Amino acid sequence: MRKRKAVTLFSGIFLSLLVLLAGCSGSGENTSGSGDGKTIEFMHLWPEGSSKQHHKIVSEIIEDFENENPGVKVDLEVLSNEQYKDKLKVLSTSNQLPDVGMTWAAGFLEPYVNGEKFATLDDLLEGDLKDSFVSGTAEAYAMNDNTYGLPLELNIATVFYNKAIFDQYGLEAPTTYDEFKNIITTLNENGVAPIALGNKDRWTGSLWYMYMADRIGGGDVLTSAIDRSGSFEDPALVTAAEEIQNLVDMDAFVRGFNGLSDEEAKSMFMGEQAAMYLMGSWDLPNYTTNEDVPQEFRDSIGYFSFPTVDGNGDLNSHVGGPGVGLFVAEDSDVKEEAKKFVSFFIQQWGEKAVTGAGVIPATKVDADSLDLPDMYIDVLNDLSEASNITLFADVQMSAGVAQVHLDLIQSLFGKGVTPDDFAKEHEDALSKE
């Protein structure tokens, strides 16, 4: 059995976050730079079209870095989330990783570390970036007592909803599953699609399943199944799968959801073609600070925690954790400059991410003097009050099991697998490791 680091993140982490904050993924895109000196190849997953503010901040940081480091250029390649993941695998196989790129923690990181593809970054943590990170975030990128990635974000997933649509039909944000199902029924009776879901990407459906499992079986049931202290055939995990298919039978999700990408689903929610959208807090800018989104729409959006199910579950238990982080390629020809760029990026990212993109960074930021949107502060408060945060399942799992999980998620939502077989196939995949 493979030894895996525990990845359920508890509220203690976020108590420290509250103190430290002083109270408070389309089409590819390429740009390139050239110079007579050294060049750092950098690949990220925030295209200008779908992540304008993130993209802008990254471009500003690159420009500042190049100005402070004459003779060093940063060649940039930008891909959407799924394109990025696919290309990273291909480049890794051919030993052509960019000098600096983005990665996720835990299981996603594992094959790259085992394959000696990523350089250790402990020297940065002990040097320029010492005491820079919120407790528990950089640790999620550690394996075998070394750190191979440095996180940029800290997120939880919430259900965003259109308050104007809810008001039109006399609905209120639910706290129980019965109330939630009543909302779905009412919206369907009035010809409004209840939930925008782009399950072609599959991790989006995983968020729904994870929350259902959390509410029915508790905050540790899924993590226990993955780290092998429990079983994926736990009755709560089977019941969670049954409830997902019950939601499908209720027409809870937009038509054709299994063939839609997340970007397409997000467009439907932002186009007011669906009333609800479960997504990570990295999407907060679209509902707070993104001036490309009409103010009237931003004002109409609220969010609620996933409801309790049949009296079970804790509204303060969330799915989330550290988001993407930066890595340096082990075989980089400019490793020294690449690490210097990563250090510079992390130091510049924190406050810029808060003020420019409404992103909750993984680094400590003194937010006392910052003017933050109300929804942003509400999410910070949710983080501070969290009783549990369960890291995204496909990130917890090894790459092989994550692929099984994601394929089964799409089959589950498409009713191509029974809940019992869904659980058994997970258990079989996990037990083989």
Image (cartoon, rainbow, N blue to C red):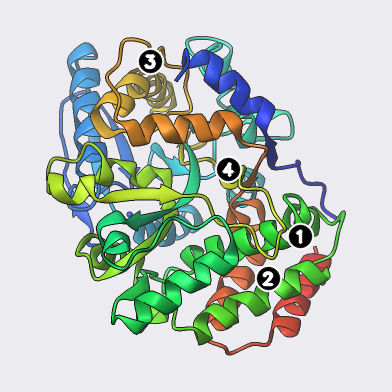
Residue under numbered circle 1: 217
Whether pointer 4 and pointer 1 mark residues with C-beta atoms closer than 8 Å, the reply is: no
217 or 74, which is in the foreground? 217
Q: Amino acid at mark 3?
A: Ala
Query: Left or right: where does residue 230 sit relative to residue 381?
Result: right
Disc sitting over residue 240 in the figure = 2
Identify the element where label 2 is drawn: helix
Q: Residue at x 34, y 47 (%)?
A: 283
C-alpha separation, residue under disc 1 versus residue under disc 3: 36 Å
Q: Earlier in the sequence, mark 1 or mark 2?
A: 1
Q: Amino acid at mark 2?
A: Ala
Instruction: Return the residue at label 4.
Output: 105
Above/below status of 287 relative to 73: below
**To which residue does mark 3 refer?**
367
Element carrying mark 4? loop
The crowding category of the residue bearing disc 3, from other C-alpha atoms within 10 Å (few below 14, some 14 to 19, many at least 20), is some
Residue extending furthest toward the bottom: 416
Q: Amino acid at mark 1?
A: Gly
Q: Secondary structure at mark 3?
A: loop
Residue 133 spot, x, y in % from top left: 53, 20
Per the model, the C-alpha gap separating discs 2 and 3 is: 39 Å
Left or right of residue 372, residue 177 in this image: right
Q: Is residue 310 above or below residue 252?
A: above
- Kindly indicate whether the residue at mark 2 contacts the one at mark 1 (C-beta within 8 angstroms): yes
Q: Quadrant of the N terminus?
A: bottom right
Between label 3 and label 4, give the one nearer the viewer.
Answer: 3
